[in-house]
Image (tube, helix red, strand yellow):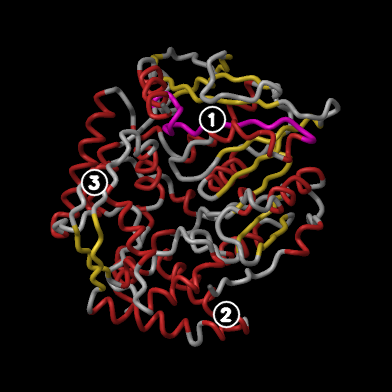
Amino acid sequence: MKTLLKLILALLFSSTCIGQVTQDFKPTFIKSKKTTHKINKKQDYTFGYLEVLENRNKPTGNTIKLPVYIFKSRNPNSKKNPIIYTVGGPGSTTMPSAQYMNYYKYLDDRDFILVEQRGTQFAQPSLNCPEWSKAIYESHLPNFDTTTYDSLFAKAATSCKTRLQQKGVDLNGYNTNEIAADINDLVYVLNIKEYNLLTISYSTKIAQVLLRDYPERIRSVVMDSPLPLEVNYDEESVANLLKMAHTLLSDCASDATCNNAFPNLKNRFFEYLKEKTENPLRVVVKNPTNEKRETFYLKGEDLITTFSSTSIANIPLEIEKLLNNDLSTIKKQLSYLFEKPDTFNGYGLGMRLSVWCAEEYPFNSQERITTETNKYPETKGLSPVVFDKEVCDIWSVQKVNAIENKPIKSNIPVLLINGGYDSDTPVKWASAMKDNLPNSFHLIFEGWTHTPTTNWSNPCGMQAAHDFFNTPNQRPAPECLKSIKSPTFKIE
């Protein structure tokens, strides 16, 4: 039923995805009774579409439509500076958050506005690439010919690009600068005099562009798991992953219970990764679709990411199981690879390609990328790049200006939030940003990972952000922060 609903929505959206405009086009907000998701009847809200230019360098070009929810505060005497929220990715959709407004603390004091980024799932158009999802599925099968890996994804990128361009999509219109301009347009269309900004992961780049280019109406900004403009993500991703693993296993060693249960775990695990890089681990898994037994060969580069979906508290135990040749967890995760890709996987992937190939790839040092791929014996062969040169050459979007790889400076109050075990956007990046943000505060949630404000099992990150929005010139110190500490590692 959910898949059918997605299909209906996709067909409706794709039928009117792009319009033509005249020289004097002005952004507009068009209310709509038909929403992207079912909303609680008790929640007061307005839904509609922001219509903007697809490419602002082409004032007579196409227009696109971006869904927007405006949720009214639960407080009848709410503050007049709403929060505008958009999520990460790049390529992720913000719209599913609309279903859970009763959990959002922010509505206790002010309105909360959800903005869909251009090119993502519920935007018109959506730059989905199911071809890419199919390629991922094929590349994970046990008998996949690894020598065809590059050509497989090159073909997928070519196919997706051709299809989108045949629909009239201008791939150069999908980048962080345009998204920031969309939010600024929304602020003026809705006549918002002052607002707060809540961003996570990739969307913290959007926040930085807004602070630099459109600061006039910004009151305060929360950047949860910041990705600085000046950081070349690909160059550091493998090193950051390994550093997080070292830190976590060192914390296990410092914990008497964990160390007694799993002595010398860090050294044993990293030696194991080195050995399996030379002599891959053979794992036989039953294919649930046909009961056939399939064989996988896993190297260190595969095994280092095996526990990425495992809770932090369970990771030492799972590593110990692996070292003792208990492959139950590995087999369970590998069995998921046999599931056919969802028809709608790949939503927003085209937008992700445009952003990455215009803003990240051009600033990478290819020499450093090669070095990082082969530098660490535990993960030799693990490429740090999100999209490689061949794919970005196929996508062929325009490189952004050099300023998009430079740090921003601002006196507007900013709260930087990190999880202590975050390997995607490590603590050191936010710490370095503070030098150019004199009115900023930095909170580190020890034992947590990526995007603490979205930790539904513990809303302390959300509470800290909420408190900051109420008093942005003070360091937030909610009571719950006192109980944030390293995890209690499970030993059985």
**Mark 3 lies on residue:** 289
Horizontal side, residue 274 vs residue 74: left or right: left
The one of 58 and 1 positioned closer to us in this rendering: 1
**Mark 2 lies on residue:** 258
Image point 44% across, 85% down: which residue? 267
Image point 38% across, 56% down: which residue? 363
Q: Give the range drawn in magenta.
A: 108-125
Q: Around disc 2, counting alpha carbons within 10 Å, would you say few (fewer than 14), some (14 to 19), or many (20 or more)?
A: many
Residue type at tag 3? Thr
Camera-nearest label, 1 or 2: 2
Q: Which comes sooner in the sequence, label 2 or label 3?
A: 2
Compared to residue 431, the image places residue 144 above or below, namely: above
Label 3, label 1: how far apart the Cα atoms are = 45 Å
Dominant secondary-structure state across the stretch colored magenta: loop
Q: Position of residue 1 (x, y in %)?
A: 41, 26
Q: Which comes sooner in the sequence, label 3 or label 1?
A: 1
**Mark 1 lies on residue:** 182
Compared to residue 63, the image places residue 268 above or below, namely: below
Compared to residue 4, the image places residue 91 above or below, namely: below
Image point 66% across, 55% down: which residue? 416
